[in-house]
Image (spheres, rainbow, N blue to C red):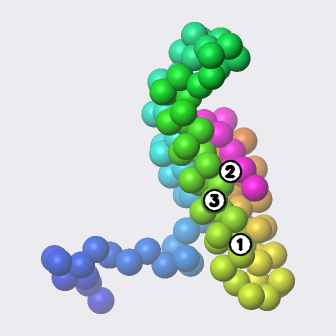
Amino acid sequence: MRASKSQEPILRTSDITPRGLALALGLLEGDNYKALQPFDYLQHLSKGPSDRVRKYITTNEKISLWVIKSILYYDTVSSQSEVFKFFTKTAFVSRKYSLAHPVVI
């Protein structure tokens, strides 16, 4: 069934792979990560985070919170375990392809 022009296609959980999610998260975080300059790291140690560092931290925290909410969404431990395994596989893929930052769990 095709989505009408007024509706966006719905992405089902079964359509998402660890590799696909890792690439999507890498793209999402990549721009923030690439924007960081050496001075940002030094400023973070002395004066606190720069705007670029804050933006990177905020994006990372949003992703981390989304992962936690996704795991805790289910009531049964077995379902939570399956979601946790999926994100763990995603983190390994992120590390394998040296993406901006692996999923933080």
The answer to which of marks 1 and 2 sits earlier in the sequence is 1
Q: Which residues are magenta?
A: 98-105
Residue 99 quadrant: top right
**x then y, percent, for residue 66:** 60, 62
What number of labels is visible? 3
5 lies above or below 47: below
Real-space CA distance between mark 1 and mark 2, rounded to the nearest whole angstrom: 13 Å
Residue type indicated by callout 1: Ile
| Gap in angstroms between the C-alphas marked 1 and 3 | 10 Å
Asked if residue 101 is among those painted magenta in the image, a careful observer would answer: yes
Element assignment for label 2:
loop
Q: On the picture, is 84 further left or further right than 28?
A: right
Secondary structure of the residue carrying tag 1 is helix
- Quarter in which the C terminus is drawn: bottom right
Camera-near label (2 vs 3) is 3
The mark lying in front, picked from 1 and 3, is 3
Q: Is residue 100 magenta?
A: yes
Q: Residue furthest front?
A: 47
- Indicate the secondary structure of the residue bearing disc 3: helix
- Crowdedness near tag 2: few (<14), some (14–19) or many (≥20) residues, C-alpha within 10 Å: many
Disc 1 crowd rating (10 Å Cα; few below 14, some 14-19, many 20+) is many
Which labelled disc corresponds to residue 71?
1
Residue 70, quarter of the rendered image: bottom right
- Residue on which the image places disc 2: 103
Identify the mark nearer the N-term, 2 or 3: 3
Q: Amino acid at mark 2?
A: Val
Question: Which mark is on residue 65?
Answer: 3
Q: Residue at x 46, y 33 (%)?
A: 31
Image quadrant in which the N terminus is located: bottom left
Residue 98 vertical position relative to residue 103 in the rendered view, above or below: above
Q: List x then y, in percent, for residue 85.
A: 78, 67
